[in-house]
Image (cartoon, grey):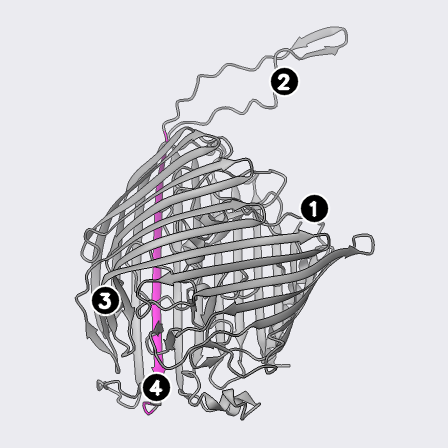
Amino acid sequence: MPKATHVYLMLFYLLLTMVGNSQIIADSSETRLKNVNMQDAMDQDTMDANLPNIQEQTTNNSAVFDFFIKLDTLDVYRHGFFRDSINYSNRLFIDTTNHNSADYDPSGLFSNEFNNLGIIGSAHESRVFSTNNQMGFNAGISSNNGFIWSPANIQLYDVKTPFTELFYLMGSKRENVLKFTHAQSFLNQQVSLNMNFRLFNHLGAYKRQKTDVKNFIVGGSYQTVDKRYHFNAQYYHNKLVLQENGGLENRSDFEENLESNREVIAINLSNAANLIRISGAAVTQNFYFSKSEPDLSAIPDTNIIDFKAFTVTHYKKPYFDPVSHLGKLSHYFNYERQNFKYTDSDQSSTLYNGLPFYPTYDSTSYTDTIGLRKYVNELTYSNSDYKDFAGKPKWINFFFGARHEYTQYFQSCQKTDFQNYAIIGGVFVNFAKQLSLSSDFAYYQGDHLANDFYFGAKVFIKIKSNLFTGGLQLTHKEPDIFYKSFHSSRFFWNNNLSKTDIQNLHAKFDREKLYLNFSLQNIINYVYIDQTLQPVQYTGNIQYLLLLVRKDFRLGPWGSDISMAYQKVSVPTVIRVPDFTGKARLFYFNEFFNKALDLEIGLEFNYFTSYYANKYMPALRLFHLQDDQTIGDYIFMDAYLNAKIGKARLFVRYDHFNAGLMDYNYYSSPGYPAQDAAFRFGVNWILFN
């Protein structure tokens, strides 16, 4: 066994030893994550099925959440780093069930549809199209976002006792996945600490395919006894070391199965690699202008009489002046540093054929570096109160404020400074428990983002357990800087691009075991990378339609989960997606040995129709149009067994067990075959101690 694997196993064993004897006091209701408002947790006011990079980067005032969430103080909850401006956090139960215990790949979750490079931790692109509504200055390199943590996807936990989650997976070709989460509070929850660590490491079956991904978050929060002031600080660090092989040199070597040993199959790049480092610090502060009301809950009502030694004692709560709720002042600060480095000491690869060569100080080597430092300050006022509760919202909440972004962009040995400013605001109106409206906006001025704006509006209708959400999004934004200017040994462009306009009309219906999603978008001045590996802007209108259905069926001990998406594009030569994509899970679940063992055995199927999927270019770190190869029209089949004993959840998987039973035409991206059949096993352990 490799030395690195010994280290991971030793760390995992030590962690289990430390917590193994802890008293488990988790609640007995093994409840799955709430489906209500799940979309808002994933995408912050964008359609969850349309996510291009698994998670969206947002600020704390970029969305207004609906309030149809019931809270239970006996449970442990998780929520995002950002609270919405009206103080209604989207809180989710911890998933302690056996059903999803083996979910380990962010780009391969059941609810996601992504093409990758055939290995965990690699670049990926969604098969379900989405526009990027992220506001603010962005580099535009997003093909690895599923394996990068940012403030938008930091998870915090509301706990009274320590919470720990451990996950370890081992697979063939030295595949290792390790996750560790710990949260703890002190001083009656005045102080809290949290830590998350994540590792993805896989050698791969083909040469130069190794991925090494490490993510780390550590932080804490403090609030005063009267809860008027709250402070939260988080540090995050991501490092991705990715070998790049550029895909197969001759697809026939794979499709004709000329070599069962994948390591001897010729590849396009023999010395290329990408290094990505993204780290930063995020801080939020909240101050409530009104003092808190005294807590008199321990004093009985005045009509309670206590007989002691033939005497009568009357209790009376003291009088206090009513508190005028004057609102809240919030400050958000984020410093982030990004570095992207591509190296290749071999310039003779056929992957570079047809590309010009721009001499550098070392013409034998291809080195390209992009850097970014970004400082964001945001100050907002809202009429929120520290006692605001999602279950009983006020009839109106609002916020307004300003944002400042200072960005240093480094490329081709040059530094460019950008100053951008924005005004932001939003309102939430609660007409009744069954009806509410929300709206938010952002308007920019500055060096790079002048006249960029975003406007979103939503309506929420709830009838019993049925939640209907409809809305409109309008976006007018500058294309990301990478598409406008880029210089390297093989690429050179300075483009004058117009702003992109996006109108998105969407609706969803959500109830237990059923989720429907409809989206209709109109896009003007869409920017993409074409077949010549150059940014191109399509100046006409492009319409995009999405219909998404997710349905869970249960019949006794049998069950199935089904997710299907249908897409239609008016200009398929520019935006290429499969017409149909879907996943299905069929399983049997039951309890044995007087409920000591919770067992689930199942099959998973993944299918999408054939299409000219975008191809990955390592030197750009992006996917681009191509006309050489179609992928799809193939069913990927997986088998799994999940077993839960106490709080330990064990699993064994045999992924892609049908590999080789049909034609060798299973690709995860053009030029990149999907993984062959492989066993994986692991453990997932959640502890409340």
Q: Does label 1 or label 3 sit earlier along the sequence?
A: 1
Q: Does label 2 or label 3 sit earlier along the sequence?
A: 2
Q: Residue 351 carries which label?
A: 4
- Which secondary structure is most common in the magenta stretch? strand
Compared with 257, 243 (above or below) is above
- Tell me whether circle 4 and circle 3 mark residues in contact (CB < 8 Å): no
Compared with 559, 664 (above or below) is below
Observer able to see residue 616: yes
| Quadrant in which the N terminus is drawn | bottom right
What residue did someone put label 3 on?
537
What span is in magenta? Answer: 327-348
Which secondary structure lies at badge 3? strand
**Front tag of 4 and 1:** 4
Q: Distance between the residues labelled 2 and 1?
A: 30 Å
Q: How far apart are marks 1 and 3 (CA)?
A: 57 Å
Which secondary structure lies at badge 4? helix
In percent of the image, x 39 and y 83: which residue is there?
272
